[in-house]
Image (cartoon, helix red, strand yellow):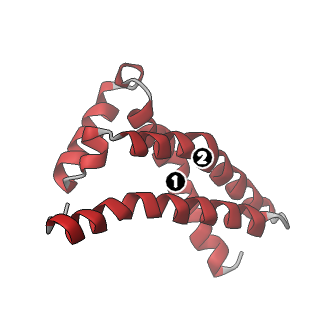
Amino acid sequence: MKLIDTILFIYFIIISFAIPLLDAQVCLPSSIFPDILVRFKNWFANILGNYLISEKPHFYVGIALLELLFAWPISIASIYGIVDGKSWVPTTCLMYGVYFFTALVFLVFPHFFLLEFYGVLV
């Protein structure tokens, strides 16, 4: 296994656990999750000051839903492809990368918008 495969494998393992356990709490009711996960999400939002997780703006709920329906299956497929040495792994990585940078624009834009027009950094 090459170094880049190892790095991608570790990244996709983290993502494959983070999406259903943390990000899914943004778009699904908290009552379906164990209490320890809900407390961890609230602690995570408070300690980092992440208003997106605590306030759940509509655009972020859409991104979280897209993560749950698209990025999670792609990350699981990438893990399988890396472990099994499939030739289509670069394609799944490209698909995930396009999703990631598209979502990143919507997550970073409000920070620059508020800073430029209101002089406030969120």
Q: Residue at x 31, y 59 (%)?
A: 110
- Please name the residue that numbered disc 1 is placed on: 15
In front of the other: 6 or 99? 99
Label 2 neighbourhood size at 10 Å, few (<14), some (14-19), many (20+)? many
Q: Earlier in the sequence, mark 1 or mark 2?
A: 1
In which quadrant is the N terminus drawn?
bottom right
Q: Position of residue 2 (x, y in %)?
A: 69, 79
The quadrant where residue 89 appears = bottom right
Q: Residue at x 69, y 67 (%)?
A: 94
> Disc 1, disc 2: CB below 8 Å?
yes
Secondary structure, mark 2, is helix
Q: Looking at this rendering, what residue extends furthest in the front direction?
A: 117
Q: Is residue 96 above or below residue 76?
A: below
Q: Position of residue 18 (x, y in %)?
A: 46, 47
Label 1 neighbourhood size at 10 Å, few (<14), some (14-19), many (20+)? some
Which three-letter amino acid code belongs to the residue tagged 1? Ile
Q: What distance separates the C-alpha of mark 1 from that of mark 2? A: 7 Å
Q: Is residue 34 left or right of residue 17?
A: left
Q: Is residue 56 above or below residue 91?
A: above
Q: Looking at this rendering, what residue extends furthest in the bottom direction?
A: 3
Q: Position of residue 60 (x, y in %)?
A: 40, 45
Secondary structure, mark 1, is helix
In which quadrant is the C terminus drawn?
bottom left
Q: Residue at x 45, y 64 (%)?
A: 105
Which three-letter amino acid code belongs to the residue tagged 2? Trp
In front of the other: 100 or 20? 100
Q: Looking at this rendering, what residue extends furthest in the left direction?
A: 119
The disc placed on residue 72 is 2
- All told, the count of numbered labels is 2
